Image (cartoon, rainbow, N blue to C red):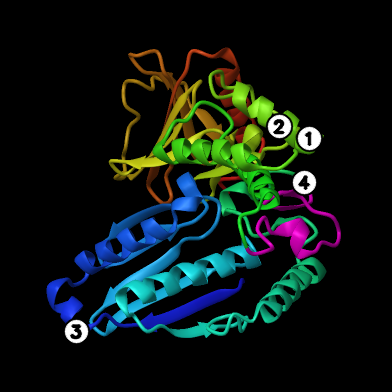
Amino acid sequence: MGIDVYATGRFPKARILRAKGQEALTLVEASARAWAKPFGPLYAARVEGDTLWLSLFPFAGDIEIGATPQGITARFRSSNLGAGFHVAAVELLEHLDQKHAIGWAWADETGYAPGHNIAALEQAMADFVGVLARFGDAMGSFCLDTALAGARPGRIGPMGPLGASFAPQDLQPWPEPGLTAQTWTRLLRAALWQGPWGPPLTDEDEREARVIRHCAERAGPLHEDLAVALAEWQGAQTICPRPQAQGIGYRRGMLRRELVPGLTMELPGQAAPAIEDGELRFLHADFWLGILHAEVKPGFAFPPAFPGPDIAIGDIAMRKGKMATGSASVAIFRPVPHDLVILTLASTEPWVREALDDWLATLLASDVFT
């Protein structure tokens, strides 16, 4: 559920003869990059096949531009950020039209494009947020990455917890056009609530950290809570703090992550997920967790690294063992279907090992596998 914009267009024949597909999108991206200079590190782009992804803020959906045999398409969702982002995205696409004579045909449910009806846009945003406030769950996340769901009790949004009722200014970080000092302040608040809380572990963490610094340099006077959060975030860039569910920042606490279908674990929000060689991994300053999910044949026996004894959960056999490196490992075997899940945890921090043991104890007391 959200507010979406679609557009279709074409390249001039002379241009399409020289560049097709990915090459054409590379030309488009160069024009987008020139337009987005005021955004600094907020702007990012990547080309994958015949699709160009443009980002004007890392904690919102991308602008998707695709090359097709018939021409070029574009679409984006603006309700996660607000009317200001909607206007900026339309301006960017109009800039690409001017540079490449695309000739967009617009399908904008707000009525803003192509006539720039700002009143219609603001009313559409107000109506959308009003529906969420009236009919949304009492416990739920709005306009957020699903990975942050349940990060705090009650209703939560891009800029923190929400009340029983809320307006666009409460939910959306960019409710008005332009990049004013107030806009940078609101974007900073959204970035601190959703961004990493610890030393950057991935390229995306690095970009989000640059975005936080960029917004802080351009923001207006900060409210006390935001000033405190910014100082705490700066301190966490060298020493990763223990998880805590207080203050600004969803990822400074614990988040529930799905390891395999039907099996979840609470992990520090700073843990960055990645897929490498078909294995799900979580990287953190204090640990490394790998999850290998495979199908095994009947008669499977636990490998020597897991000598036992078995921990029984109904018909499930679970063993905890140690690898040669000293990493604590857990194997969970589910005979029907014939699934084997191996968790490999590498850490020298006692609190990490204790948290793993607590999680195993929770599994033994639950019906998660039945």
- How busy is the neighbourhood of tag 4: few (under 14 within 10 Å), some, or many (20 plus)? few
* Viewer-side residue, 65 vs 142: 65
Is 160 on the left or on the right of 27, as rendered? right
Q: Height in image: 207 above or below 227?
A: below
Q: Residue furthest left?
A: 18
- Kindly report the distance in space between the C-alpha atoms of the residues bearing marks 3 and 2: 53 Å
Amino acid type shown at disc 1: Asp
Label of residue 153 in the image: 4
Label of residue 229 in the image: 2
Is 230 on the left or on the right of 89, as rendered? right
- Residue 159 on the magenta segment: yes
- Of label 3 and label 1, which has the lower sequence position? 3
Amino acid type shown at disc 3: Lys
Q: Are marks 2 and 1 in contact (CB under 8 Å)?
A: yes
- Of label 3 and label 2, which has the lower sequence position? 3
Instruction: Give the magenta range.
Output: 153-177
SS for callout 2 = helix
* Viewer-side residue, 6 vs 280: 6
